[in-house]
Image (cartoon, rainbow, N blue to C red):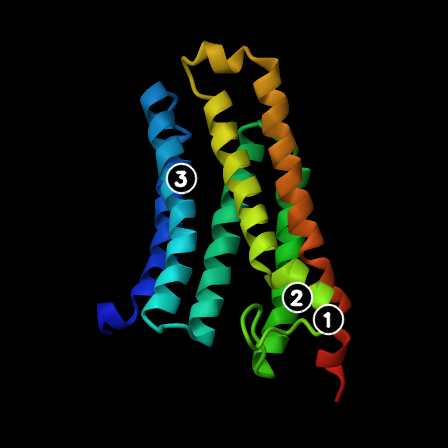
Amino acid sequence: MKIKDNLANIVSVSRIFVAFVAISLLYVQTTWAYILAFLLTAVAFSMDGLDGYLARKLNQSSQWGSVLDILGDRIVEASYWIVFAVLGWISIWFPLICITRAFTTDGIRSVALSKGYTAFGEKTMQSSNIGRFICASRFMRISYAVAKVAAFMLLIAVNTPGMELWNGTPALHTVTMVFAWAAIIFCVVRGIPVIAESGRLFKS
């Protein structure tokens, strides 16, 4: 495998490991470990945008790349929600909703992929304008990404050991939970068109 010909896919996979390192640091109860986890979380989400940019710039877009991109999204997002819930920072319903939505939409998308459709791009499985806007538009994808990265980074920030200023600020906790709820609502809303428009995929 030539690295230069698969750079976008390598970035997609690498960000999973960057996220895992960040998450593991949350179990090291020191200020510096959390600061490093905060920075690595920013890197992991930056790589999410970088892989798409490289795919377009280097003409490396493919169905396999699309699958890897979604796979990376699911693993990173679910891992953070699960760990945050285990640490007691959020309700268990956050990861449960995230994982349920992921299994449902990705199961449908696997059928779409077998019929030549992709989640995004020119061959998107969404047939309606509103479906394409909610699932595939740049505005919705960026809005969802911003809500997620803001929620995850703020959750780490407000729970950083030794940062009494952040931990003692109720307003910051409120803002954090607003972004967390916004992220999970985006997660659900962006899955609705996938389910609603899936009927045609199962017609013989």
Pointer 3 residue: 42
First in sequence, mark 3 or 2: give its number: 3
Amino acid type at mark 3: Ala
Looking at the rendered structure, the secondary structure element under dot 2 is helix
Pointer 2 residue: 132
The reply, left or right, for residue 45 in relation to residue 144 is left
Local packing at callout 1 (Cα closer than 10 Å; few below 14, some 14-19, many 20+) is few
Looking at the rendered structure, the secondary structure element under dot 1 is loop
Q: Nearer the viewer, residue 36 or 150?
A: 150
Residue contact at pointers 3 and 2, CB within 8 angstroms? no
Q: Quadrant of the C terminus?
A: bottom right
In the image, what residue occupies the spot 73% across and 72% down? 198
Residue 188, percent across and down? 69, 51
Residue contact at pointers 1 and 3, CB within 8 angstroms? no
The span from disc 1 to disc 3 (Cα, nearest Å) is 34 Å
Q: Is residue 184 above or below residue 109?
A: above
The span from disc 1 to disc 2 (Cα, nearest Å) is 6 Å
Q: Nearer the viewer, residue 124 or 31?
A: 124
Local packing at callout 2 (Cα closer than 10 Å; few below 14, some 14-19, many 20+) is many
Residue 41, percent across and down? 41, 39
Q: Nearer the viewer, mark 3 or mark 2?
A: 2
The reply, left or right, for residue 74 in relation to residue 185 is left
Q: Quadrant of the N terminus?
A: bottom left
In the image, what residue occupies the spot 65% across and 39% down? 182
Looking at the rendered structure, the secondary structure element under dot 3 is helix
Q: Is residue 28 above or below residue 22?
A: above
Pointer 1 residue: 128
Asked if residue 25 can be seen in this view, the reply is: yes
Asked if residue 104 can be seen in this view, the reply is: no
Q: Nearer the viewer, residue 29 or 110?
A: 110
